[in-house]
Amino acid sequence: MPRRDHSKGGASQRQLRVGEELRHALSAILGRHDFRDPVLESANVTVTEVRISPDLKNATAFVMPLAGEHAPEILEALRRGAAFIRSQVAREVPLRYMPAIAFALDTSFEQASRIDALLHRPDVARDLDPEAADEDGAPS
């Protein structure tokens, strides 16, 4: 069976499945608050997505602290504790090799808010409304 190149079409089913398993495990581990680091001990962190490399050796976990508060401190604490967190994930997810886990701040919420604000601006809303274009006599 020929190997398919997923570089253009996105992640393979295996990458998606492993990423989702890692996301669930990370969410459970972060929810237990079993950390020596005081920043992580009291932080409520959501793991929104885990992207994994095609060779399954590296994973990037996208996280967002509750209400976005103290994001830089929490992200730094996660990076400091990455080895410990990786060992905890290895106990919960049965993989031959546990990928190295990097943490990144999920900015998709900010982007969605910015797009929403742009779409609700009066000049943009007018351009998007087909009935308003018909009343002005402009072609739609």
Image (cartoon, rainbow, N blue to C red):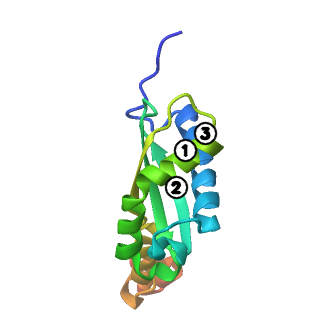
Q: Residue 4: x, y in percent?
A: 46, 21
* Amino acid carrying mark 3 in the image: Arg
**Image point (55%, 28%), residue name:** 96
- Residue 19 is tagged as 1
Q: Are marks 3 and 1 in contact (CB under 8 Å)?
A: yes
**Image point (48%, 11%), residue name:** 2
* Amino acid carrying mark 1 in the image: Gly
Mark 3 burial class by Cα count in 10 Å: few <14, some 14-19, many 20+ = few
Q: Nearer the viewer, residue 95 or 80?
A: 80
Mark 2 burial class by Cα count in 10 Å: few <14, some 14-19, many 20+ = some
Q: Which comes sooner in the sequence, label 3 or label 2? A: 3
Q: Residue 49: x, y in percent?
A: 52, 55
Quarter location, residue 107: bottom left
* Rendered view: 135 above or below 52: below
| One can see residue 140 in this view | no
Q: Residue 64: x, y in percent?
A: 48, 70
Q: Residue 48: x, y in percent?
A: 54, 61
- Local SS, label 3: helix
| One can see residue 45 in this view | yes
Locate the C terminus by quadrant.
bottom left
Which residue is tagged 3? 17
Which residue is tagged 2? 49
**Image point (47%, 53%), residue name:** 84
- Residue 77 is tagged as none
Mark 1 burial class by Cα count in 10 Å: few <14, some 14-19, many 20+ = many
* Rendered view: 13 above or below 103: above
From mark 2 to mark 1, how far is it between C-alphas?
A: 8 Å
Q: Are marks 2 and 1 in contact (CB under 8 Å)?
A: yes
Q: Which comes sooner in the sequence, label 2 or label 1? A: 1
- Local SS, label 1: helix
- Local SS, label 2: strand
